[in-house]
Image (cartoon, rainbow, N blue to C red):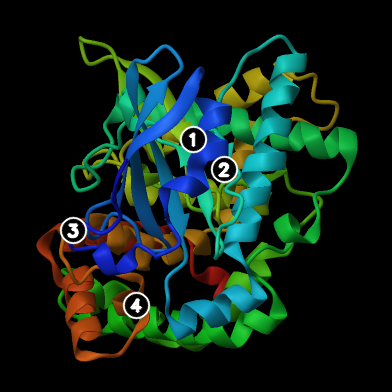
């Protein structure tokens, strides 16, 4: 057997404990007729700038089957960053523990709700347990050999891909609402999630960093005079407002938000004519039960094409609402079903999610691939970090998007809540 665990520019990120023998039980579970490992390789699984929150590795294994034939199999192994800030965050909110629970308990439960209604649904990849792992991890089937791939985040999703994503999101939201209606509230890990009081100081620091850098380049944007003073005024209140929005209002239609619903966290498969066959969701690290506005703003502002982002926003909400109602009916939802007007009212009520999306994840989605794109540089004040953030907020692509999104948010009253 040959073993190759360190082969490319991500070599330093492949821990020594990621070895072939660790995967034997997984192979017995997932490969029919597995006999032995012939070769093993672990290497970087995503390009620079395509994943920030974790280290992603692709584990490629050649196996011999009981009949003597050979087969290639692969898995995606997600690991934590070896950074002090990251470790501090993990002490109070272990995103790996949260995601492991999502794959092992929550996702199967929502799929079963549909199965009980006579509908087969697959939301995510199959997860596996890796006995003997020396750190937190998430091990998933590699969806790429099944024809799944992400889209070009820089171009943004066209209408067809956006509609498929919204349809799947509506299914997810509907099942989570039914789950709570029939089984009761989710645990604190999902109802409070990342928004714990002990994390508030760290979030203030992160939000100040993001807001400060956004403000620094805001003066470059055409039409900034409409809103730049408001951006300055609300900087000290951003974290308080964010925590306020995450408090669950029982009068709202509440769902389990994916929490990180952007184009790189959904994978599509297509037929030979380019028509979409299926979509799978990935990265269930920061789920949060609460208003649907969180996922809807996060997705539609971060990941759609520039020409569709605002012109089709209301259409996309209507389409999402129609799919939501369809799925709530299939699942025999017993509580009040939200009207389209109520969904729009919710979006106005929680409009500040739009600002948070536009000034954070949208910038990361639209920046050109670069080796400096990393979790560390996104949050640090180092020279390299500051240079990266200059790219985030000053590049022409982001400027085109933010110059239409900011006036739109202002005109919708997205900042009015801060005046009360």
Q: In the rendered structure, which disc, 2 or 1, sits on the residue that comes first in sequence?
A: 1
Label 4 or label 3, whichever comes before in sequence order: 3
List the residue tagged with mark 2: 344
* Disc number lying in front (4 or 3): 3
* Label 4: how many Cα within 10 Å (few below 14, some 14–19, many 20+): some
Q: Nearer the viewer, residue 314 or 109?
A: 109
Asked whether, in this view, residue 399 is left or right of residue 125, the answer is: left
Residue under numbered circle 1: 317
Q: Residue at x 37, y 15 (%)?
A: 68
Residue 376: image tag: 4
Question: Label 3 vs label 2: CA separation?
Answer: 48 Å
Q: Does 71 appear above or below 229?
A: above
For image coordinates 47% across by 66% down, the residue present is: 80
Q: Are marks 3 and 1 in contact (CB under 8 Å)?
A: no
Q: Classify mark 1: helix, strand or loop.
A: helix
**What residue is drawn where x is 18% and y is 63%?**
9
Q: Nearer the viewer, mark 3 or mark 1?
A: 3
**Could you tell me how many numbered marks the image carries?**
4
The residue labelled by disc 3 is 8
């Amino acid at each position: 057997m040959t073993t190759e665990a360190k082969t490319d520019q991500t070599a330093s990120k492949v821990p020594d404990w990621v070895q072939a023998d660790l995967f034997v039980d997984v192979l017995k579970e997932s490969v029919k007729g597995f006999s032995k490992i012939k070769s093993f390789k672990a290497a970087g699984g995503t390009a620079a700038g395509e994943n920030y929150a974790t280290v992603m590795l692709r584990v490629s294994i050649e196996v011999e089957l009981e009949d003597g034939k050979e087969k290639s199999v692969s898995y995606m192994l997600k690991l934590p960053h070896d950074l002090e800030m990251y470790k501090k965050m993990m002490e109070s909110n272990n995103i790996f523990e949260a995601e492991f629970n999502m794959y092992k308990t929550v996702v199967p439960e929502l799929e079963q709700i549909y199965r009980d209604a006579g509908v087969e649904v697959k939301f995510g990849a199959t997860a596996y347990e890796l006995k003997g792992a020396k750190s937190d991890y998430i091990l998933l089937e590699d969806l790429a050999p099944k024809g799944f791939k992400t889209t070009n985040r820089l171009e943004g999703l066209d209408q067809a891909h956006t509609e498929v994503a919204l349809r799947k999101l509506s299914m997810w939201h509907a099942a989570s609402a039914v789950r709570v209606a029939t089984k009761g509230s989710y645990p604190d890990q999902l109802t409070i999630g990342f928004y714990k009081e002990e994390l508030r100081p760290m979030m203030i620091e992160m939000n100040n960093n993001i807001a400060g850098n956004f403000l620094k380049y805001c003066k470059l944007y055409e039409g900034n005079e409409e809103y730049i003073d408001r951006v300055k005024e609300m900087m000290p209140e951003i974290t308080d407002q964010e925590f306020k929005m995450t408090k669950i209002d029982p009068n709202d239609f509440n769902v389990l938000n994916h929490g990180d619903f952007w184009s790189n966290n959904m994978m599509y498969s297509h037929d030979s004519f380019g028509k979409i066959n299926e979509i799978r969701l990935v990265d269930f690290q920061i789920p949060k039960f609460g208003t649907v506005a969180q996922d809807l703003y996060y997705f539609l502002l971060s990941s759609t094409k520039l020409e569709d982002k605002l012109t089709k926003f209301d259409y996309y909400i209507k389409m999402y609402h129609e799919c939501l109602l369809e799925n709530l009916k299939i699942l025999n939802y017993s509580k009040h079903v939200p009207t389209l007007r109520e969904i729009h009212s919710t979006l106005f009520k929680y409009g500040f999610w739009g600002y948070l999306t536009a000034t954070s994840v949208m910038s990361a989605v639209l920046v050109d691939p670069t080796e400096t794109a990393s979790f560390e540089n996104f949050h640090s004040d180092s020279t390299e970090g500051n240079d990266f953030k200059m790219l985030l907020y000053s590049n022409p692509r982001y400027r085109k998007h933010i110059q239409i999104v900011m006036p739109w948010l202002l005109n919708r009253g997205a900042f009015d809540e801060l005046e009360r």
